[in-house]
Image (spheres, rainbow, N blue to C red):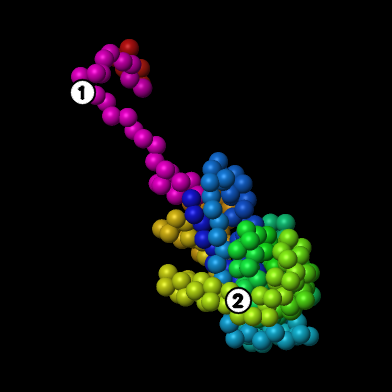
Amino acid sequence: MKVEIWSDIMCPFCYIGKRRFEAALQQFAHHQQVEVTWHSFELDPNMETRPGQSIHELLAERKGVSVAEAKRMNDHMAGVAQEVGLHYDFDKVQPVNTFNAHRFAHLAAAQGRQDAAEERLFAAYFTEGLNIDDADTLTRLGTDIGLDADAVRTMLASDQYAQEVRVDEYHARQIGVRGVPYFVFNDKYAVSGAQPAELFQEVLEKVWDEFNPQPVPTVISGADGPACGVDGADC
């Protein structure tokens, strides 16, 4: 089974959705036969990396509320994250442009480390308050997950994987993605948002059953003999 996930590192629901999906996948009997692919999605492609600005200030600016109210909103989100075992430290979060982080994830994908890259980026952003648009930071995160430091630096100094990010975003527009996280199962079923693990589990079971139907034996004409019915009839 194929599962594709569009997400952005700066999206708090994307990390929560990752945890809820993982919880469902862990309970899924065929989890080893599920191939998960992450796709890039920028919530704000024009976002500027502004060191020194807090995420509370940015949210207040965008929502038209006070910084105190924005902090309350972020505190609520941190509570939701805590329910799935995540620690969000919004006091440390640095608002950044995530384009380079997405390129980093594509580099990791090319070396079979995509999920590790997504996990490391989310933790760096929401928990550690790191600048994930910074080349030195991304290089260090790369070595954390087993990537070659020189390969990361070389990629960041070029336009490598820029096209891959744009293709992901184009594909998202083509299939009508309006927000993230966005999960697509076997190119047929979509789940939008950080849904409960129970819903993800239902979808996994439904898609598996549909694409892997159990064969129903055909009864050969004239080859049916005396038998007991399920309600005991004819016995």
**In the figure, residue 71 lies in which quadrant?**
bottom right
Q: Residues within 10 Å of mark 1 (few under 14, many from 20)?
A: few
Q: Secondary structure at mark 1?
A: loop
Return the x and y of residue 92 as percentages of the image width and height: 79, 75
At a point 72% along the width and 86% down the height, the residue shown is: 50
Image: 195 above or below 7: above
At a point 53% along the width and 46% down the height, the residue shown is: 33
**In the figure, residue 20 lies in which quadrant?**
bottom right
The C terminus lies in quadrant: top left
Q: Is residue 20 left or right of residue 128?
A: left
Q: Residues within 10 Å of mark 2 (few under 14, many from 20)?
A: some
Image: 204 above or below 99: above
Name the mark on residue 34: none
Camera sees residue 81: no
**Mark nearer the N terminus (2 vs 1):** 2
At a point 74% along the width and 78% down the height, the residue shown is: 135
Image: 15 above or below 103: above
Tell me the magenta residue range.
204-230
Return the x and y of residue 163 as percentages of the image width and height: 53, 76
| Residue on which disc 1 sits | 221
Return the x and y of residue 83 as percentages of the image width and height: 70, 57
| Residue on which disc 2 sits | 160
Q: Amino acid at mark 2?
A: Gln
At a point 68% along the width and 80% down the height, the residue shown is: 157
Q: Amino acid at mark 1?
A: Ser
